[in-house]
Image (cartoon, rainbow, N blue to C red):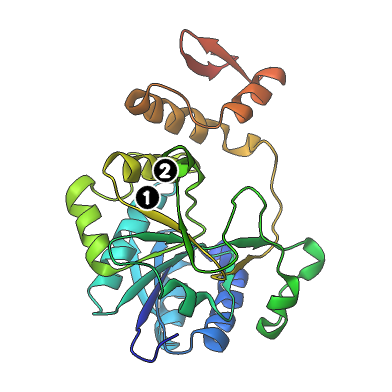
Amino acid sequence: MSAETSIAVVTVCTPGRIDHLRSQREALAANLPEARHVVVLPERPGSAELAAELAELGAITVELPAGPDLPVARSRNLGGGRAAELGVDLIVFLDVDCMPGPDLGCRYAEIPDGALGLGPVTYLPESAGAPDPADLPGLTDPHPARDFPARGTRPLEPDEYGMFWSLSFALRPGLWRYIREDFGGFDEAFTGYGAEDTDFGRRLLYRRVPVVLVAGAHAYHRWHPVSDPPVDHLDDLLRNGAHYARRWGEWPAPGWFAEFERRGLVRRDGEDWVRASD
């Protein structure tokens, strides 16, 4: 990374993810030691204590009220806004489960002006535990669904914008401000799990914001238990999916809903999905 490039890293965290946040901060100290860390803390039991701990460690905290449905979209918008106020050259959004690799900063710094960049993410196995940042390069095994270039950047084609993910992406503050002014950033009507990043990617395409895949900007996603499909988030997916469908005329994650239907959890109601028990 060029010595002239200053970076702010934005993370959304709840107290239940504190162990993963500590891994992220350890990797930031090793690989992006000059980066400012903006941690957004939706209100949850223990979040005030976590905010105090992070402030003592030099992180910038953004606290916000939150009901039972986690306001992920609003949290990202507030975090991006706070990062843009810091006068940095680059904003990197990292999921709390992601540890930055040694070249993430310098590769993201190569993003063309006016473009948003996506970096490759390796999903670590359970056996990796909480790896030492020095060991991350040896664990590199990026998710195969995205065809990253061997070097440099590659623009997404229009039919690839559905590949946008919020685990790791970067852009310059000026572009973030433009996105917020143009269409609001992440749609805060999405709450809880699902669809807000797919919607964001489609709106980037609709507003003709270039998105590029960035070679070598590796992040490493620590393992945590998941359900596939995410049955524990079914209510969120039904609510957010309906909002998404009202905008785009189709539901997101059709494979998940097909599997929910196969399991007898949902049924069709015209063009919509509803709980089978409704």
Decide which of 249, 141 is in the foreground and name it: 141
Q: How many marks?
A: 2
| Residue 157 in picture, x, y percent from top left | 44, 44
Return the residue at label 1.
Answer: 73
Say left or right for 275 vs 35: right
**Residue 196: image tag:** 2
Instruction: Mark 2 and mark 1 in contact? Answer it, CB < 8 Å.
Output: yes
| Residue 269 in picture, x, y percent from top left | 49, 9
Task: State whether residue 164 is above or below residue 254.
Answer: below
Q: How crowded is mark 1: few (under 14 residues within 10 Å), some or many (20 or more)?
A: many
Disc nearer the start of the sequence (2/1)? 1
Task: State whether residue 82 is above or below residue 117.
Answer: below
Q: Quadrant of the N terminus?
A: bottom left
Label 2 secondary element: helix
- In the figure, residue 4 lies in which quadrant? bottom left
Decide which of 206, 192 is in the foreground and name it: 206
Task: State whether residue 122 is above or below residue 275.
Answer: below
Decide which of 163, 239 is in the foreground and name it: 163
